[in-house]
Image (cartoon, rainbow, N blue to C red):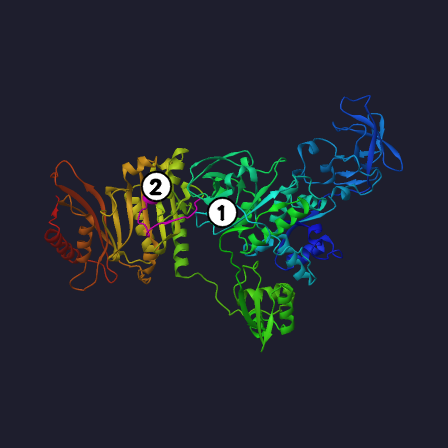
Amino acid sequence: MRTSRKWLSQYVDIDDLTMQELADKITAAGLEVEGCEPMSSGSNLVIGEVLTCQPHPDSDHLNVTTVHVGDETLQIVCGAPNVAAGQKVIVAKAGARLPGGEIKKGMIRNVESNGMICALFELGVDPHLLTEEQKAGIEVLPADAPVGHTDPLGYLGYDDEIFEIGLTPNRSDCQAQFNLGMEVGAILDREVVLPNFDNASVCGKDTDLKIESETEQCPLFLGKVIGSITIKESPRWMKELLQAAGMHSINNVVDISNIVMLETGQPMHFYDIDAIRNQEITVKNGFDEDYVALDGETYHLLPEDIVITNEGKPIGIAGIMGGDDSKILDSTRGLIIECASFDHVSIRNTARRLNLSTESSLRYQRGIEPMAPKKAMDRAVQLLIQYADAKEIGETVQCGELRDPQTVLSCTAEEINNRLGTDFSCEEIVSVFDRLLFAPIVQDGVITVTIPSHRTDMEGMADLSEEVIRILGYDRLPSTLPYMPMTEGKLNKKQSLIRMTENLFCDQGLQQCVTYTLISTAKKDDAVLACGEAIELASPMSEERRWVRTSILPSLIGVAAYNEAHGNKNTALFEISELSSREGTQNHLAVVLDGVLEQTRWLHESVPADFYTLKGLIEAYLEKIGVNANTILLKPNTKDTTHFHPYRSAELYLGKKMVGLLGEIHPVYAKANDVKRLCIAELDLDAILQVKKSKVKFSAISRYPSVSRDLAFVVERSLPAKKIMETIKRHGRDPQTKETILKNVEVFDIYEGEHVAENEKSVAISITFQSSRQTLTDAQMNQVFDSILEALEKECHAVLRK
């Protein structure tokens, strides 16, 4: 939001404040001044007249001029291509200080030069405010410019100071200079004088103008016919204020529409009366066609866009830009005024899609006060009569209802002070509401205020309290030390589990990844162990970032694919992330192994990244965090055979609850992701956290020797080796002493092939016996060994292989 000292000075007396002091006071009251700088700068300047202009004898682009500056004539060497005799120009005399440095007398290619003929951009004027001609050379002043005048910047209206104010979303009312002036008056506690234009548009004769809205996105439309106007140059004050706002002056009529928008915050549009057939305007949507706008560019309209039409044909993109075929020309004899309210969401969507950001669209998007259309119409009619000789004025035609919201709020001084922690008196609080034009009335200690229509942000007690403290000053808040109960800084159970998980997997040589939370539709559909129904963003940045993910694996597989594509063959990755869905949030762990997990080349040893390695990693991890090994159960995968290999994957259970899936990636899914043979897993960390953990128990190392026996059994091929191991463990107790002497059971070989039936396999197992009380005898071990063989034969139909 741009404003200037001259503009604010029209409404409030600020002559005694410097630019920085004013900026500090506005910022302290909640409207942050992001920048303030003079519109132009330069000392020791004067208006001069070029008497002579001759080519430089030693240059093909310089000219030697003599310039009369009132009390003397100076010789100046000038390089501007447009300098010529007879021009009135701006001269910086020797000693002048400009934004680019100090001007000194000197010799330029052996010719004396006693100053500089200036272009406006050399005096600090924003190039965006200048025409291409002005940027290409020196500034040529009007023929009646007074030679010797020592304030050329003031003569041109560039003696102003510009303020850039960052408006918060709740203070869109300050887009209007009138409202900003009232705000500054309240901050400084000074009288505010605004132009009087109330009901200036309540005039005119019967009109043939017809206004209609066929869409709910235009709840109010005001129209007015001005039958006769005069197109001419705008008054000086109007051109200067438009310059301060960063706008070019065009002619008096167009400038009035812009100045009214800036003053009231309400965009409006003037149509050439001869371009509107039958004086009929209808607001509608539903178009799907190309349209040439006021800037000469062609835009494609869609059915959801709000369009201003005449006889069914578009004449303007509502709230954004008018059409090229109805703009105000030098030949315009009359006009039709449009002043309307439009749905801000629709305006935002259209402006963003068309990449068409205008002063009008920005104001509609931020929000406009309900009474702004009426104020804008009144002010426009007043200025058109005064500066455009407006005549043959028709009555105002209205479509929709103009609502003046009368918000009435009540509070007491005690309530305000209790909320703020202050001790303001009732008189101080009432004075603030007076300064803000809230019309306070005090009765029996209750302060009742009526909120002006432009303060749409005022809704309740909290807002009233905020107004009081920001106007009286935040430095009035008492300084108190906050009450902070002493707490112990430590991780909770979930944080501890996550921290331990990260450390354990990093210790095993895996690398931790952090991938995007937002994913594409394809990755959303490929969720593994999804935590619920995915959430779609209302306004995604791109199709690749449309959904909030419910699974980590699709993203982590993408990391593996990237590494494979760049020649990194052996990757071991894991990621821990909080996933969100419509049902809530969950913490998941995902693992991806590719190639070889560990490799020692000089020993010719390696640990392949296969199903068994992944299974071992996860079992070791669960054991490390305290999960009892007896509760860990792996079952053949039947839940997801789309992403996992149907015969090389498993479901992971802790007790009766499934907490994860692990195994080799399905070949079809691998091909779709441009990866080779991966081992993948995804676990529900929240479910693992809820499992009761075993207490750590310590026992002394046995002093007695251990004995190992190896044996092989022939069993059915479909029998899991785990069942054999569980059977052995259940029968490892010495029947005499009741001590479990079976210390370890380990499968070290599985054989299928020659000498074994087609539907059978040989499982080789190593069994270790050891007692913590005595040295075991052969009789004791044989007794336990025989009971194990008997149990295996009975429960597993195992035959001892000889």
242 sits left or right of 525 in the view: right
* Residue 166 visible somewhere in the drawing: no
Using the rendered view, name the quadrant where residue 436 is placed.
Answer: bottom right
Q: Residue at x 49, y 55 (%)?
A: 401
The residue tagged 1 is 211
Residue 451 included in the magenta stretch of the image: no
Q: Amino acid at mark 1?
A: Ile
In x, y percent, where is residue 328? Answer: 60, 38
The range drawn in magenta is 524-540
User: Which of the 4 quarters of the picture holds residue 593?
Assistant: top left
Q: Is residue 401 visible?
A: yes
Q: Amino acid at mark 2?
A: Ala
Residue extending furthest toward the bottom = 444
In this view, the residue in front, 126 or 550, is 126
The mark closer to the camera, 1 or 2, is: 1
> Where in the figure is residue 790, as x and y percent of width and height?
11, 54
Disc 2: which residue: 522
Q: Disc 1 vs disc 2: Cβ atoms closer than 8 Å?
A: no
